[in-house]
Image: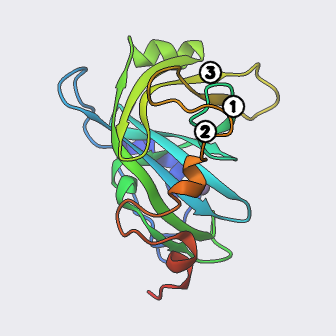
Amino acid sequence: MDPAMALEEYNRKRDFGKTPEPSGRAARAKKAGAAPLAFVVQKHAARRLHYDFRLELDGVLKSWAVTKGPSLVPGEKRLAVEVEDHPIEYRDFEGTIPQGEYGGGAALVWDRGTWTPKGDPHKGLAKGHLDFELDGEKLHGAWHLVRMRRNGKRNNWLLIKGRDEAARAPGDPDILEEHPESVVSERVIEEVAQAKG
Ligand code: MN
């Protein structure tokens, strides 16, 4: 895709005179297998709290809004609504988007690290079934993103933990409650919201 066009929707939705989010051009796509690909999960207290799950691919961050956040329990499938691609620099974004702007509210970097697709991720995304490994500070091991039957304009996927040693059983501690803090600043979302500037 033309790098200038790749983030058109992202840029169109935002007024960079008002939001502290990075404006973006797509970065150069990494060659398959050449370098680790980044992933980030941002906790975002917009009108409704959600977790933004982002995977680097082709010089952008492919993005899903996970309404309840990821679960380490393989049986707990979490709705992940596909949203517009974000710039790579967004992986560092932590701060507060002003009220009235798109996505207004505080956001923190809840987890960050690298991801490894199993097989060709382009085929997986096109097919609607992406298998991958995460190597973050909180999220590890096998994960799946599976597209649900298309309904309307929205692209609804399910984010599902794979069955491995990083998985938890129902009734085990919830990672979202156990570790609510930013992996960058160790702040919780209320502290980010209260911070000035
Ligand atoms: Mn969001």
Residue 63 visible, this orientation: yes
Mark 1 close to ligand 1, CB under 8 Å = no
Mark 1 or mark 3, which has the lower sequence index? 1
Residue 90: x, y in percent? 40, 55
Residue 18 visible, this orientation: no
User: What is the distance, in whole Å, between disc 1 and disc 2 at their CAs?
Assistant: 6 Å
Q: Is residue 148 left or right of residue 21?
A: right
Depth check, front residue: 79 or 64: 79
For the N terminus, the quadrant is top left
Residue at (52% x, 74% y) in the render: 96
Q: Is residue 20 left or right of residue 175?
A: left
Above or below for 112 versus 165:
below
Are discs 1 and 2 less than 8 Å apart at CB?
yes
Residue at (44% x, 18% y) in the render: 122
Depth check, front residue: 18 or 140: 140
User: What is the distance, in whole Å, between disc 1 and disc 3 at their CAs?
Assistant: 13 Å
Q: Quadrant of residue 159?
A: top right
Judging by the rendered image, the residue that carries numbered circle 2 is: 71
Q: What's the coloring here?
A: rainbow
Residue 146: mark: 3
For the C terminus, the quadrant is bottom left
Above or below for 132 versus 93:
above
Three-letter code, disc 3: Val
User: What is the distance, in whole Å, between disc 2 and disc 3 at their CAs?
Assistant: 15 Å
Above or below for 52 versus 97:
above
Judging by the rendered image, the residue that carries numbered circle 1 is: 76
Three-letter code, disc 2: Ser
Depth check, front residue: 106 or 155: 106
Three-letter code, disc 1: Glu
Q: Secondary structure at mark 1?
A: loop
Callout 1 crowding tier (Cα within 10 Å): few <14, some 14–19, many ≥20:
some
Residue 179: x, y in percent? 50, 57
